[in-house]
Image (cartoon, grey):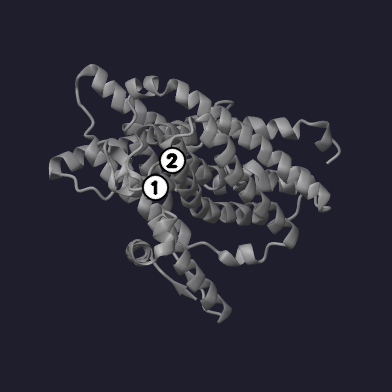
């Protein structure tokens, strides 16, 4: 077994991003279907590690940097959101949120229905629904442990991790093709060369930006404060009725910092530095997450579970095409939102952002998508998901479980 330390893992993650960029630039399929660079590079490495494991060679990474990078990304999302923008996007956020809720309900109904039809415990269907797909690894681990302790469901945690991994991979793979299909419906040929609006924030992470050492330190300080205060807030709310995931607390603190300092006239957040640091954090987070995927967990999935997850992926794509795209206006922004919905509907908010970046880098910016998706994916999805899950568990169907 080869164990890479902190520095070795950081080097590996950087090389994964460079590999992903080279693949996207050289492989027409990846470029055509807007596959995010961290997904392309990370999956190649994960497949390589799977091959090595068949030769009894295992490589393990130090993933201690993964959580801080994810939290730093959400801190920059918070620091990028001003209340004026939130007010402008109010109606759009509300409509998108309704679409998201609809998907959560469908995912759990599909999971439970298919599990029952295949002769599995209906709780397994719930685990392969919104718990792990919209919820991701963190939510899956929490509910998996609870299902094992309270309901005696064996291997619930392992199933949750495998399902969340499946969702993370597929969420990053289907967003680009879905967006391309929808954009071809609403845009004229040559759109890729037309970028009439100025890009902003996370929409074009590779755009060169001027950074000074002092302004960089100022922004780094704001992110650090968001992480510190957000973590303390999460500790205070732990095991209370108001408990929230750590990243939501960090994002909330970022929003308060941005708007509080602005309202007091003390400091204006420098959005260019925020977007640069946010995109660096996001790219490294996804690289580490994907290159350290244990694909053998997916290979070990029983056929019935695989059928459920494959069906959920198809449902997500169809929902994005026929529901999300239409209710959001059937235009270019709606197509980018559909790609983002695929990202966090199956995987996580960072995957959604990566999907949208891959699309907007090629076709042009979509400011409303980069306002709505992080807001819904960070602020609302986990809270609403818990409500939906508890609603299903309260059904008489589960009373005898």
Q: Which residue is mark 1?
A: 359
Residues under labels 2 and 1: Cα distance? 7 Å
Residue that protrudes farthest toward the top in the picture? 264
Q: Position of residue 396 (x, y in %)?
A: 83, 32
Look at mark 2 in the image and give the residue it sits on.
Answer: 336
Nearest the viewer among 238 and 53 is 53
Q: Nearer the viewer, residue 130 or 180?
A: 180
On the picture, is 10 further left or further right than 143? Answer: left
- Which residue is located at x 68 percent, y 38 percent? 106
Q: Is residue 288 above or below residue 279?
A: below
Q: Would residue 324 appear left or right of 42 to someone viewing this image?
A: right
Q: Which mark is residue 166?
A: none
Q: Position of residue 102 (x, y in %)?
A: 62, 32
Residues under numbered marks 2 and 1 in contact, where contact means CB atoms less than 8 Å apart: yes
Q: Residue furthest right?
A: 400
Secondary structure state at the residue bearing disc 2? helix
Res 322 visible: yes
Residue at left offset 29%, top offset 27%: 258
User: Badge 2: how crowded within 10 Å, few (<14), some, or many (20+)?
Assistant: many
Disc 1 element: helix
Residue sitting at x 53%, y 48% = 347
**Mark with earlier residue (2, 1):** 2
């Amino acid at each position: 077994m080869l164990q890479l330390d902190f520095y070795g893992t950081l080097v590996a993650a950087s090389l994964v991003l460079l590999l992903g960029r080279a693949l996207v630039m050289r492989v027409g399929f990846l470029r055509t279907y807007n596959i995010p660079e961290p997904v392309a590079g990370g999956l190649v490495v994960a497949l390589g590690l799977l091959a090595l494991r068949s030769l009894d060679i295992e490589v393990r990474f130090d993933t201690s940097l993964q959580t801080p990078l994810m939290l730093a990304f959400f801190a920059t999302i918070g620091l990028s959101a001003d209340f004026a923008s939130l007010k402008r996007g109010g109606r759009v956020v509300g409509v998108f949120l309704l679409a998201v809720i609809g998907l959560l309900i469908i995912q759990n109904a599909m999971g439970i229905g298919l599990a029952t039809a295949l002769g599995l415990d209906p709780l397994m269907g719930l685990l392969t629904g919104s718990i792990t797909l919209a919820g991701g690894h963190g939510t899956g681990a929490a509910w998996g442990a609870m299902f094992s302790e309270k309901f005696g469901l064996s291997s619930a945690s392992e199933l949750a991790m495998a399902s969340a991994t499946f969702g993370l991979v597929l969420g990053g793979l289907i967003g680009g093709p879905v967006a391309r299909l929808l954009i071809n419906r609403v845009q004229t040929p040559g759109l890729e060369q037309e970028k009439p609006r100025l890009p902003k924030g996370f929409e074009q992470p590779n755009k060169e930006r001027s950074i000074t050492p002092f302004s960089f330190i100022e922004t780094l300080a704001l992110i650090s404060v968001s992480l510190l205060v957000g973590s303390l807030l999460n500790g205070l709310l732990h095991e209370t009725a108001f408990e929230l995931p750590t990243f939501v607390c960090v994002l909330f603190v970022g929003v308060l910092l941005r708007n509080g300092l602005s309202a007091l006239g003390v400091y204006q957040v420098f959005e260019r530095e925020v977007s640069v640091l946010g995109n660096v954090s996001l790219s490294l987070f996804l690289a580490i997450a994907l290159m350290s995927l244990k694909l053998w967990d997916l290979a070990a999935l029983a056929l019935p579970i695989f059928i459920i997850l494959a069906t959920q992926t198809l449902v997500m794509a169809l929902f994005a095409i026929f529901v999300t795209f239409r209710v959001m206006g059937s235009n270019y922004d709606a197509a980018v939102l559909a790609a983002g919905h695929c990202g966090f509907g199956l995987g996580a908010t960072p995957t959604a952002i990566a999907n949208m970046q891959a699309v907007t880098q090629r076709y042009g910016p979509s400011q409303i998508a980069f306002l709505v998706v992080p807001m819904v994916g960070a602020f609302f999805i986990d809270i609403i998901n818990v409500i939906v899950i508890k609603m299903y568990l309260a059904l008489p169907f589960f009373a005898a479980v």
